[in-house]
């Protein structure tokens, strides 16, 4: 590897993967360097500068590093390569293509092997958009190429500030990403050349345009989310839950069914077996919105628990930078980070080696600000061409023992727009999804109600009523466990039965049923109207046994209808029969 070094140094101390290096020249915070070990350069990042010494975080196993080992600094920050070819690709936390490394090195990844993030040999059909004499700024389009079904914009690099006047543009044709596609002069008369590839430091937000408030709902196909805990495109939400509660399964559903253009999946510190399952399943799964393979709209960042811990921090930032790049093209992107708890553990390990004053549970004192800065990189951006692009960020949190009072969960709850708390009790009871609506909330209910108000007048009031029924039904159920059904009034028992029906027939879905596993919004609306009618009906039963018998019959019919394809005569007939059953019971 040939480096344009800005400085060199020698290792003077080592603490695990943290090296202390004396240097000569100019070095800055966040700069990338390479530590030479047996002829191999190990990638590292400057995380602290004190006088003529720096502390380097090495992203590889430091076995073999010795006193006075040579360190070469590149002068560049830790950057992401951005250009066509990122989709359908599996990267590690440093944006190395794992498939290419596996082909070269086998199943066990060696140290010091780094490959370009974007294939330099593949040719792309490039369509020139800009013309000679055009004055452009960062983020403006030079040309386009098709990446799958998406129009990929080749933009003026975001690292370029100011205005540039084009003096030459390439004609449309088939080119590799390193081909110069345009040249121009800036306001000082200096000439610049542009290719299809650009770079951006991953720890700095990539942004051009105007940030606006989210106004569009992200349809997930999960009734419990779309109704009770809705998410907006450009919003943020988290899914905390104990181990085994179904966080990864929930994120798999979101990646498959969410109404977004692209999905960036960051497996940060996840078990290798779970990541292997993703890599095996995604190429075989079909995107229900386009009927194409799901992998064609997905970019995967893998930094499993068996990979170097130090690279976990960069994997989250790498994923959000790639998401920001596609957002600037006017696309809706969903970023799934699984899990931010293991990212926070990497921050804690780095902080400990830097001998910083620890905060709560030994996490660094700046944990909350780092988490807030990460989620703030989501949002909706209004672009020059009046298009809007968005990044919706979902962070899975793995609190030890399911304790939601621990620092990572609390710092996350302070900044996200929705909280989808998963329950071990619900997952053990085989309730899918295992989101507990009694502890979950969303700040987007009002915005979604405005969006659906024309189609369903009073949607927001219906959702609030359903939430009240759930809360009252849960309290009545707890009393019944103590005093029994006989000690509960018939009216209270009916409220409890309504809450049970809502939970069992609407909030829960059958993940193994092709129809019920994905419930689009146009199917949810008639189902929720049915539930609302049940809530509003004042049933008068002669006994508790008659009430329970009726609601069990109703549950069976609704569950059966949930497996019937929508907009079929069979579905309409089943829905009509349920309404007739309710009307008959109301008249008794």
Image: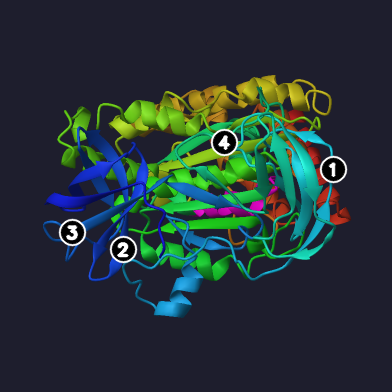
The magenta region covers 249-261
Tell me which label, 4 or 1, sits earlier in the chain.
Answer: 1
Image marks 1 and 2: residues in contact by CB distance under 8 Å: no
* Disc ID at residue 132: 1
Judged from the image, the secondary structure of the residue bearing numbered disc 4 is loop
Q: Between residues 73 and 242, which one lies in front from this camera angle? A: 73
Q: Is residue 215 left or right of residue 57?
A: right
Q: CA distance from mark 3 to mark 1?
A: 50 Å
Q: Earlier in the sequence, mark 4 or mark 3?
A: 3
Badge 3 local density, few (<14 within 10 Å), some, or many (20+)? some
Quadrant showing the N terminus: bottom left
Work out how far the residue at label 4 is from the one at label 1, CA to CA, in angstroms: 27 Å
Reading the image, the residue beneath label 2 is 41
| Depth check, front residue: 435 or 430 | 435
> Where is mark 4, residue-wise?
206
Tell me the mark number nearer the camera, choosing from 4 and 1. 1
Left or right relative to 203: residue 298: right
Q: Is residue 118 visible in the rendered structure shown here? A: yes
Mark 1 is surrounded, within 10 Å at the Cα level, by few (under 14), some (14 to 19) or many (20 or more) other residues, namely: some
Q: Residue furthest right?
A: 569
């Amino acid at each position: 590897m040939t480096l344009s070094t800005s400085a060199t140094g020698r290792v003077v101390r080592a603490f695990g993967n943290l090296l202390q290096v004396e240097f000569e020249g100019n070095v800055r915070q966040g700069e990338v360097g390479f530590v030479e070990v047996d002829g191999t350069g190990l990638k590292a990042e400057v995380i602290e500068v004190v006088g003529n010494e720096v502390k380097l975080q090495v992203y590889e196993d430091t076995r073999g590093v010795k006193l006075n080992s040579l360190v070469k600094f590149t002068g560049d920050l830790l950057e992401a390569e951005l250009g066509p070819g990122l989709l359908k690709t599996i990267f590690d936390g440093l944006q190395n293509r794992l498939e290419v490394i596996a082909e070269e090195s086998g199943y066990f990844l060696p140290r010091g092997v780094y490959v370009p993030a974007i294939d330099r040999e593949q040719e792309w059909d490039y369509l020139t958009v800009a013309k000679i004499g055009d004055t452009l700024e960062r983020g403006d389009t030079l040309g386009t190429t098709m990446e799958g079904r998406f129009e990929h914009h080749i933009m003026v690099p975001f690292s370029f500030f100011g205005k540039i006047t084009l003096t030459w543009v390439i004609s449309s044709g088939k080119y590799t990403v390193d081909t110069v596609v345009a040249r121009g002069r800036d306001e000082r008369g200096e000439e610049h050349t542009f290719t299809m590839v650009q770079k951006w430091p991953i720890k700095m937000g990539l942004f051009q345009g105007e940030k606006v408030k989210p106004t569009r709902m992200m349809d997930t196909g999960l009734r419990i989310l779309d109704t009770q805990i809705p998410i907006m495109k450009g919003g943020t939400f988290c899914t905390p839950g104990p181990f085994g509660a179904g966080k990864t399964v929930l994120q798999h559903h979101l990646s498959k069914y969410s109404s977004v253009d692209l999905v960036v999946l960051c497996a940060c510190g996840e078990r290798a077996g779970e990541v292997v399952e993703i890599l095996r399943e995604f190429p075989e799964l079909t995107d229900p919105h386009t009927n194409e393979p799901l992998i064609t709209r997905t970019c995967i960042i893998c930094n499993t628990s068996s990979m170097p811990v130090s690279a976990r921090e960069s994997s989250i930032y790498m994923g959000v930078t790639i998401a920001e790049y596609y957002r600037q093209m006017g696309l809706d992107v969903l970023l799934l980070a699984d899990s931010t708890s293991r990212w926070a553990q990497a921050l804690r390990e780095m902080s400990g080696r830097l001998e910083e004053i620890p905060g709560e549970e030994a996490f660094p004192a700046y944990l909350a600000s780092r988490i807030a800065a990460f989620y703030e990189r989501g949002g909706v951006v209004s672009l020059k061409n009046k298009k809007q692009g968005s990044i919706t960020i979902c962070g899975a949190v793995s609190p030890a023992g399911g304790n939601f009072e621990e620092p990572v969960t609390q710092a996350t709850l302070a900044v996200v727009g929705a909280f989808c708390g998963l329950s071990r009790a619900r997952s053990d009871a085989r309730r899918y999804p295992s989101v507990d609506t009694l502890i979950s909330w969303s700040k987007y209910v009002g915005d979604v109600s405005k969006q659906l108000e024309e189609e369903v007048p009073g949607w927001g009031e219906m959702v609030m009523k359903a939430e009240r029924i759930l809360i009252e039904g849960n309290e009545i159920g707890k009393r019944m466990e103590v005093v029994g059904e006989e000690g509960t009034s018939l009216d209270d028992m009916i409220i409890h039965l309504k809450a049970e029906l809502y939970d069992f027939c609407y909030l829960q879905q059958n993940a193994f049923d092709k129809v019920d596993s994905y419930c689009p919004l146009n199917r949810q609306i008639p189902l929720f109207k049915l539930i609302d009618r049940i809530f509003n009906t004042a049933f008068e039963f002669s006994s508790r046994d008659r009430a329970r018998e009726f609601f069990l019959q109703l549950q069976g019919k609704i569950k059966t209808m949930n497996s019937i394809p929508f907009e079929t005569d069979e579905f309409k007939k089943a829905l009509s029969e349920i309404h007739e059953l309710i009307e008959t019971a109301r008249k008794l």
